[in-house]
């Protein structure tokens, strides 16, 4: 079935023109010429996307967007603001109201089509998918935590690219979850504007969080990997002490996919400390900086003391930047004293290009050496995962 788009605009000529253009692109079109009609049709038609004008009588597009986001029936429908209001404040208001994208009139048809395709490709936000039941109830997947000693070492980049590499190599179900309230970065890296899934779960009591609740908040990326995204709003960092919540979420996630990759961020936070026992193994991110090596060695000692010995620790040397101040691999190995499973070569240009395009590195540059190194890391992990009965 063709994807259905609800076009909302009080200008009849615009409705007709945009509707005709989109129909020629293969979309099914429904139309509303005011805000109240849009709210009714969004519930009855259940469109895959809403193209929403701002300047309308009685109820403007911002208010329509807020009401759509406040209704459980329509809150996950992607919304693109399509309007002549082009000031920065207008765009900020649109995103604050809950829009997924903002496009100003007039625009070339190609640009409109590109924005629509991009938003639709970001996944059916919150919609149940067949993958949601891929892992039988009670059957546990392999949980991989990713951690470093400080921020800015590429843990989130490691998490998403490893998750996609596991998906590509095994063809099995993979979930990548950010356990970093107030510090989420994957949403912005991938082009999702309002990462609220984890925040909504944290607003419940731990014992009230069900597998269905967690499944509802997962976003399906166009690679097939499902995501549980953390908020990037600083105030949400207060949830770092909500350890019982994260423990409950981790337990549910562990039975919802074959591989679960947890972005734990820097250090042994209260969250990481709580859910270490849920992790089957840890990927420790290391960089070629002397003080970081000393700190990571101390982290390794702590993890080993907690039972993460041989076979449960996977150290990766992630060289993201070319710098004469960084040590050679041989020097790092001599100072670190622990085995390093994978060494990533610096690829700052490719990382920048991928971030700019909101596309993970292993997708944007799938044949690059760095992508091959992610594939090698995924292979190392799958080698010691016991097959399910």
Image (cartoon, rainbow, N blue to C red):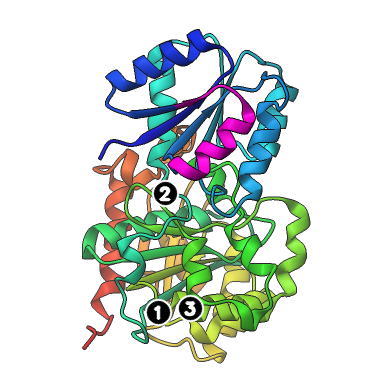
Q: Name the N-terminal-most of marks 2 and 3.
A: 2
Q: Residues within 10 Å of mark 2 (few under 14, many from 20)?
A: many
Please say whether residue 51 is visible from this viewpoint. yes
Q: CA distance from mark 3 to mark 1?
A: 6 Å
**Which structural element holds mark 1?**
loop
Q: Is residue 279 above or below residue 104?
A: below
Residue identified by numbered label 3: 252
Tell me whether circle 3 and circle 1 mark residues in contact (CB < 8 Å): yes
> In the rendered image, which quarter contains the N terminus?
top left
Callout 3 environment at 10 Å: few (<14), some (14 to 19), or many (20+)?
Answer: many
Image coords of residue 44 (percent x, y): 47, 43
Q: Position of residue 149 (x, y in %)?
A: 61, 66
Specify the quadrant of the image occupied by residue 283.
Answer: bottom left
Residue at left 59%, top 66%? 179
User: Compared to 66, does 270 lie above or below?
Assistant: below
Magenta: main secondary structure equals: helix
Q: Is residue 354 visible?
A: no
Question: Which residue in the structure is indicated by mark 1?
Answer: 255
Circle 2 SS class? loop
Residue at the disc numbered 2: 124
Which residues are drawn in magenta?
A: 31-45
Q: Please report the residue visible at 69 percent of the width from the left and 31 percent of the height from the top.
A: 62
CA distance separating discs 1 and 2:
21 Å
Residue 50 among those drawn in magenta: no
Name the image quarter holding residue 229: bottom right
Say which residue appears at 71% left-offset and 17% top-offset: 87
Quote the CA–CA distance across marks 2 and 3.
21 Å
For marks 1 and 2, give the one nearer the viewer: 2
């Amino acid at each position: 079935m063709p994807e259905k788009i609800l076009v909302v605009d009080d200008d009849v000529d615009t409705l007709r023109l945009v509707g005709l253009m989109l129909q020629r692109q293969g979309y099914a079109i429904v139309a509303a010429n005011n805000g109240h009609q849009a709210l009714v049709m969004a519930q009855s038609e259940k469109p895959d996307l809403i193209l929403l004008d701002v300047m309308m009588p009685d109820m403007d597009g911002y208010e329509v967007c807020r009401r759509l986001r406040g209704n459980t029936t329509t809150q996950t429908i992607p919304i693109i603001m399509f309007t002549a209001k082009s000031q920065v404040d207008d765009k900020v208001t649109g995103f604050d109201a809950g829009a997924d994208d903002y496009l100003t009139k007039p625009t070339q048809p190609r640009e409109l089509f590109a924005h629509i395709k991009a938003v639709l490709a970001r996944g059916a936000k919150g919609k149940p998918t067949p993958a949601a039941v891929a892992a039988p109830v009670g059957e546990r997947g392999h949980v991989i935590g990713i951690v470093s000693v400080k921020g800015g070492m590429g843990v989130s980049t490691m998490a998403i690219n490893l998750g996609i590499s596991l998906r590509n190599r095994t063809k099995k179900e993979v979930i990548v979850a950010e356990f970093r309230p107030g510090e989420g970065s994957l949403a912005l890296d991938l082009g999702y504007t309002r990462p609220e899934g984890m925040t909504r779960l944290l607003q419940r009591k731990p014992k009230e969080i069900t597998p269905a609740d967690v499944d509802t908040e997962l976003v399906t990326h166009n690679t097939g990997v499902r995501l549980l995204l953390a908020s990037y709003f600083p105030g949400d960092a207060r949830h770092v002490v909500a350890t019982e919540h994260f423990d409950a979420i981790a337990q549910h996630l562990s039975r919802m996919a074959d591989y679960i990759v947890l972005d734990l961020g820097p250090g042994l936070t209260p969250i990481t400390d709580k859910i270490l026992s849920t992790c089957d193994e840890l990927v420790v991110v290391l960089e070629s900086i002397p003080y970081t090596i000393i700190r990571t060695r101390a982290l390794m000692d702590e993890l080993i003391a907690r039972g993460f010995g041989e076979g449960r620790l996977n150290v990766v040397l992630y060289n993201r930047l070319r710098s004469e101040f960084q040590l050679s691999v041989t020097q790092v190995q001599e100072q670190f004293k622990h085995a390093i499973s994978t060494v990533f070569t610096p690829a700052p240009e490719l990382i920048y290009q991928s971030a700019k395009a909101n596309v993970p590195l292993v997708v944007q540059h799938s044949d690059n050496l760095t992508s091959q190194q992610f594939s090698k890391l995924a292979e190392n992990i799958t080698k010691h995962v016991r097959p399910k009965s």
